[in-house]
Amino acid sequence: MAQRKEIQIEISPTGEVTFTVNGVKGSACLAETQFLEEAIGGQVLSQEKTSEFYQQVPAGVGQKVEQ
């Protein structure tokens, strides 16, 4: 069974947008949000990596990014 991937998007009253990615290991989470960053046309002000970012993806297991 495939692991569930989730992107949580929050927009503050001032227009600041925050993305939180869950269910994606390693640096693949950066690719998961790239299309959102491009769509809003804004500049990334800060980036916090979760513990999932530092988890290793098993050899031979790729994470396909679907848009």
Image (tube, rainbow, N blue to C red):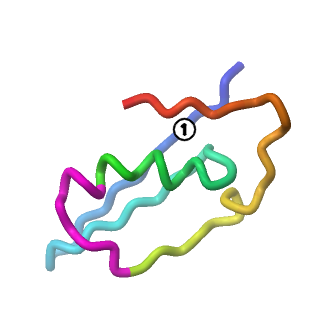
Judged from this view, the residue extending furthest toward the front is 60
Residue 17: percent from left, percent from top: 27, 67
Location of residue 67 by image quarter: top left
Location of residue 1 by image quarter: top right
Name the residue tied to disc 1. 5
Q: Secondary structure at mark 1?
A: loop
Name the residue nearer the viewer: 51 or 56. Answer: 56
- Residue type at the position of mark 1: Lys
Q: Residue at x 44, y 29 (%)?
A: 66
Label 1 crowd (10 A; few <14 / some 14-19 / many >=20): few
Judged from this view, the residue extending furthest toward the top is 1
Magenta-tinted stretch: 37-45
Residue 64 falls left or right of residue 53: left
Q: Is residue 20 above or below residue 63?
A: below
Location of residue 2 by image quarter: top right
Q: Residue at x 34, y 80 (%)?
A: 45
Name the residue nearer the viewer: 23 or 63. Answer: 63
